[in-house]
Image (cartoon, helix red, strand yellow):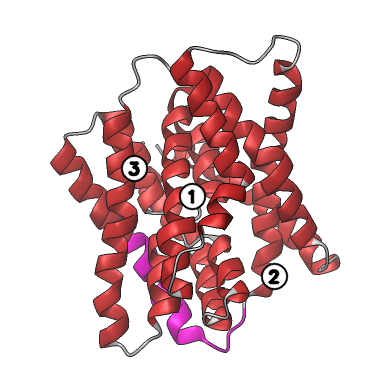
Amino acid sequence: MITAVLGVTVPIFLIVAVGYGYGRVHPDGIEFVNRINLTLFIPPLLFFVLSEKIPADLEWGGIVIGAAVVVLGSGLLAWPVARGLKLPVKALVPTAMMNNCGNLGLPLTLLAFGETALPLAVVTFVVYVALHFTVGIWLVRGRLDLSLLVKNPIVIATALGFGFYLAGLHAPTMMLPGIEMLSDVAIPLMLVALGVRLTDVDLTHWRIGLIGAALAPATGIVCAGAAIWLLALDPLTAKVLILFGALPPAVMNYLLAERYDACPAEVATIVGFGNLAALAVIPAVLLFIL
């Protein structure tokens, strides 16, 4: 069992470490890397998996509702904690809700459970993205910005992928290799970008960083367990949901906090501490579910 866990985590953390080392030597340019990944590589990955890899008998309802329960339930659990500890809600609640399902969730699922589970991970990722750019922005900004959702390449690719799947369509045969090659870049680049971001960890707000790092996986696992029990999910879907619930806060939390001036320093610390804590949390969770 230990060997299986190491087989999943070592490749992931090795690539993150490469990104961290690169970020220490070349601290500039990560914004460009993230932008090109979000616009050129992740959208083809989502389109390819949704249109070509999802089995016809996949039960959508369970994983969609389960993912929504984890996101929204985590927010409901984190809210009173933030109020009780007199910590900024705009920093603690979104980071508990919106976890690193892209940078870590997709590669971890692929290595832990194989390509069979990748469609489940992609659907979960899509739910997280939709909620992040609606509920998440509402939390940090105080109102929705639907223009961000409509213009988002990830959302557009998701809509196209679902449309092709539902209509039984496929991309032209000559285009598929190119789409697949673009999609193959996305996951390793996510991990490198995560490693570079870890170079920005700031100890100034260490208290909220530690609390946020513990709160995100704790609320996620509790809500995932509740969803599994309520929805009677099959074993593979349940394992994917627990894994996603245990993930640390997403880097996107910091980008949105910085954009809308919603406690960006505190959010950056939570994201940094949370992803460092994942070095211990993720192997422990994998030991339980594998």
Closest to the camera, between mark 1 and mark 2, is 1
Task: For the N terminus, give its image quadrant.
Answer: top left
Distance in Å between CA atoms under marks 3 and 2 = 29 Å
Q: Are marks 3 and 1 in contact (CB under 8 Å)?
A: no
The foreground one among 152 and 28 is 152
Task: For the C terminus, give its image quadrant.
Answer: top left
- Crowdedness near tag 3: few (<14), some (14–19) or many (≥20) residues, C-alpha within 10 Å: many
Residue type at mark 2 is Thr
Place of residue 98 in the rendered image (x, y in percent of width and height, measured from the top left): 44, 59
Mark 1 lies on residue:
129
Q: Is 268 left, or right, of 281 in this rendering?
A: right
Q: Residue at x 34, y 45 (%)?
A: 67
Residue 163 seen from this side: yes
The foreground one among 229 and 123 is 123
Residue type at mark 1 is Val
Determine whether the residue tagged by mark 3 lies in a helix, strand or loop: helix
Mark 2 lies on residue:
199
Mark 3 lies on residue:
241
Q: Is 30 left, or right, of 228 in this rendering?
A: right
Q: Residue at x 30, y 88 (%)?
A: 85
Residue 216 located within the stretch drawn in magenta: yes
Q: Is residue 222 above or below residue 188?
A: below
Q: Residue at x 54, y 21 (%)?
A: 51
Determine whether the residue tagged by mark 1 lies in a helix, strand or loop: helix
Q: Residue furthest front?
A: 147
- Along the polypeptide, which appears first: circle 1 or circle 2? 1
Place of residue 70 in the rendered image (x, y in percent of width and height, measured from the top left): 31, 52
- Along the polypeptide, which appears first: circle 3 or circle 1? 1
Residue 266 located within the stretch drawn in magenta: no
Which residues fall within the magenta stretch?
A: 202-218
